[in-house]
Each structure stands twice: as structure tokens, then as C-alpha cells.
Amino acid sequence: MRIVVGVDGSESSLRAVDWAADNAALRRTPLRLVYASLWERYEGFSLAQGVDRPSEQVIAEEIVETAERRAHRRQPDVHVTTDVLPEEPEQALVRESHSALAVVLGHRGRSSMTEAILGSVGVAVAEQAHCPVVVLRHDDDQDRPGTPGRIVLGVDEKPAGSAALRFAAEEAGLRGVPLEAVHVSRHGVTGTLLGSGEREPDAALALDEALRDVPIGLEVLRRTVSGRPRDALLAASRDAALLVVGARRRPGHFGPQLGRVAHGVLHHAACPVAVVPELS
């Protein structure tokens, strides 16, 4: 198993390489850098003239070579492989997700147009991937696993034994930071840590049930707040190292698989966001 990064030559995707290289070092796993584009669709004339390496292919190879050098500088001991795939990025990255621990993407592309495309790619991959998808929102020092700060987990109504919980707990354990589980109640509960005596019993029970499989020794903060889940998680993301949310999949359903909360945090969170697929 390896960590896969979708690269496109933008600074945002290179920062995704940094983040993924750090994470691969923490997990002691290989790193795979992938550039996917339908360059062959636009290079028909060159191919017809017998040119062996069309310009777009040359650019693609330079992109992955630059990303590879960046990864080696960041984490020299991480094993790195690269590939150039002449296909749609969404299809390529979803296929890569079958054998990946995580797929990592930047949010901004090489231009305003590619930024819009990359945004849609990120959502499409998060909807269909078979592993966690990490999207880096901002170009700042929070975009690296070694950054101090907690891991925030959004807890929903069916959290026990969830893949999102396992991923968030593993990230917190690898980094040696606390895991904060945030459950949003619509019944007027104010946001303070559990244990203060100011919690509805059902809210406390829901969080206890959600966290029953947390590894022993991991520091866990339990918090229930009132209001809209999206707003609560965006607020929690401001000083977090990573925000983790689950995406419930419906077998046989081929439409959009992400809910409004996941969409909202992917586009507006102040820290990297991990979307973890959950089968329901």
C-alpha cells in the first residue's frame, strides 16, 4: 500500500507532495506521484506526424520529475515512484485509490480555469475513491503532518467503528497529538468539553459510543456543540492540523455521494481535509 498524490505542476500540488511525503515518512510507506491528463486527445496531429514525444507528454514528464525531486528533498528516505497517465484525472485517481492508503490533492491548479477543474476533480475523487482523500485547502504551515495541532473528527449519527474514526485516531497517534471528536447537536447544547456536567446524557452517550474503539493511550477531547454541523467543523478547523469527515456510500447508487457537510468543509476549511469513505 502507498500514498498517491495527484500532481499538475502547480504550487498547490507541490505542497500536496510535501504533505504526502511527510505522511509517508510517518507511516513508513511508499509514495506514488501521478499526473493524469487526456493529452493524447489534443496531440492528434503530432501523433499522426509520427512525433514520438508530443509537447504535452514532455510537459507531463517534467511535471512528475519536478514533483519527484521535491519529494526526495522533503523526505530522502521515502521510496518514490511516478507515472504519467493519458486519461481523465478523476478516473485515474479513483482507480489508483484501490491500492492506496490515501489519495492527496491540492486545491488550486495552474490557472483560474484549472483551479475550477481541480476543484471538481477533488470532489469527484472524494465521492468515488476507495480510500481516504486528503485535500489541502491553504498554502500555509498547517499543510504538513508535523505541524502541532489536534486532529478533528466530525462525528455523525452512526459513528461506532467507523473508518473515519480509525483514520483520525491513526493520524493523531502517528503525530502524537490529541484527537478531538466534535458532535453537533440541534437541541441547543452549548459547546464545552464533556465532563463538565453541562451535557445532555444522550449526547455524552453518543460520543462515548463513537469513541469506544479509540486506542488506549490516545488523548481524546469530546465536544458537543449546537448549530449547523458545517459551521461547527469549519470553526474547529481554524487551529487544527487535519479535519476528518466520513462520506457514507450507498451500494448501487451512482449519483453524488458527498453530503452538504463534506462539500462545505472541502471548499472552506482552514486546514487540510480528509474525506473517508464509509459503506452504509
Image: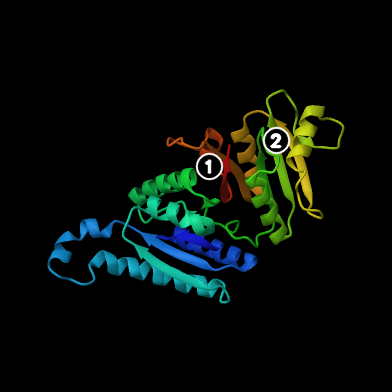
Report the residue marked by disc 2. 183
Circle 2: is it few (<14), some (14-19), or many (20+) Cα within 10 Å? many
| Residue type marked 1 | His
Q: Circle 2 sits in a helix, a strand or a loop, which is it?
A: strand
Give the percent coordinates (x, y) of residue 269.
Answer: 56, 44
* Pointer 2 with pointer 1, Cβ within 8 A: no
Q: Quadrant of residue 235?
A: top right
Q: Quadrant of the C terminus?
A: top right
Indicate left or right for 156 with 116 as reference: right
> Foreground mark, 2 or 1?
2
Kindly tell me whether residue 7 is visible in this rendering.
yes
What residue is pinned by disc 1?
Answer: 268
Judge left or right: residue 93 versus residue 79. left
Q: Secondary structure beneath disc 1? A: helix
Q: Is residue 154 left or right of residue 94?
A: right
In the image, residue 81 lies at what x, y percent? 46, 71
